[in-house]
Amino acid sequence: MIAVIQTEIDRLITFCHVVRLGSFTKAAEELFLTQPAVSVQISKLERSLRVRLVEQRGQRIYPTDAGKRLYAYAEQVQQLCRVLIDATRAVADDEGELQGRIALGATTTIALYMLPSLLRQFQQQYGGVEIALTVTTTKSIVESLPADHHDFCLIEGVVGSSLRAPGIRYEPFFKDELSLIVHSGHPWAERSRTGIALDELSREVFIGHRPGSTMQVIIERVLRRHGVKVNQKMAIDNMEVVKRMVEAGLGVSIVSQVVLDKEVTAGELVIVPIKGVSFSRTFHIGTLNGRILSRAALTFLDYFRDAVAAKYCSPQTGQLGEPAAVCSVDGRDQMGEKQAPCKGGQSIAAMPGGRGGRRPR
């Protein structure tokens, strides 16, 4: 009897994925199944109910009227399964050595430049915890969070209301300052203290980022507000490649200061201030509303917030990680929302009221 119920639940959850994603292939990818296996589960569900549940129109799968009615109930079943799993994890976590598995999604900049040393330190202290890290775009992570692929996610920005998915809570943890960089032999390198005017950017070849990326959207928005057009010759979706292109003298660019420690220290790249204008974005922790995180996940998040605050926030003023007065243009964040004055390269966990509680409830 239990096995039969479990089979029906599995089919309902598969059905939810197919309807939500509009694709057997995408549902298979999220569920780590083959596409034929997903098709078979839907077919068996339809046969058991003696009704057609989905139909294909063009390139997308849509629910029939009966499918729409079933989907409303199937979603509730999926939510109850999630609550049950979370509850058993929470009870099992109450005692003993910290153990378990943490599944987290992170965007490239966070994964490549913020997580390595932190993960090493965390696993030295909590060796019984296994970490499964998925690195992809903000959009992909936000879309996959409701599918239970990740306990939580670490993302570089939520640009526009389209990514503010319902049911997801976004907690800001770091305000990232973006800076203009030039190679060490560039004439502007001598102006690393005095800075340049924003309109001077139009005189140089500009190396941009992937269209639609958080970084590119912020840069374009600031330039547009100030009526400045740049001579963009390249759009690159990899920060390391952007830096190498600038080092080679192929142009100038605006990047996160988080990625610049090594090159600036070695004198290969120079940060040049832009007078009267600041570029910044906010990094977020994303969790599902109502999700009960395991003790391992909660411990990691506390550890992560403290480590970010320790590394990137200093009582002195000056370089990255030391509060230099800077906030988003027009007092708005990357989603166009009003924000209080902030400090660049600063952990929001260290700002008054920035954390809003160490553990999500």
Image (spheres, rainbow, N blue to C red):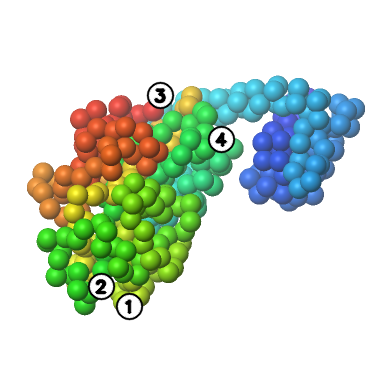
Q: Which mark is residue 361?
A: 3
Question: Is residue 21 in view?
Answer: yes
User: Mark 3 or 1, which is nearer the eye?
Assistant: 1
Report if the CB atoms under discs 2 and 4 are less than 8 Å apart: no
Q: Which mark is residue 146?
A: 4
Residue plotted at (68% across, 47% down): 26
User: Mark 2 or 4, which is nearer the eye?
Assistant: 2
Instruction: Using the numbered discs, state the Cα–Cα distance from disc 1 to disc 2 in whole angstroms.
Output: 7 Å
Q: Amino acid at mark 2?
A: His
Asked whether, in this view, residue 264 is left or right of residue 143, the answer is left
Report if the CB atoms under discs 1 and 2 are less than 8 Å apart: yes
Q: Amino acid at mark 4?
A: Pro
Asked whether, in this view, residue 256 is left or right of residue 11, the answer is left
Q: Which residue is nearer to you in this view: 216 or 258?
A: 216
Instruction: Using the numbered discs, state the Cα–Cα distance from disc 3 to disc 1 in whole angstroms.
Output: 49 Å
Q: Which mark is residue 248?
A: 1
Q: Which residue is nearer to you in this view: 77 or 167?
A: 167
User: Mark 1 or 4, which is nearer the eye?
Assistant: 1
Instruction: Using the numbered discs, state the Cα–Cα distance from disc 2 to disc 4 in whole angstroms.
Output: 43 Å
On screen, residue 162 above or below 211: above
Q: Which residue is under mark 2?
A: 183
Q: Which residue is nearer to you in this view: 332 or 63?
A: 332
Secondary element at image label 1: loop
User: Mark 3 or 4, which is nearer the eye?
Assistant: 4
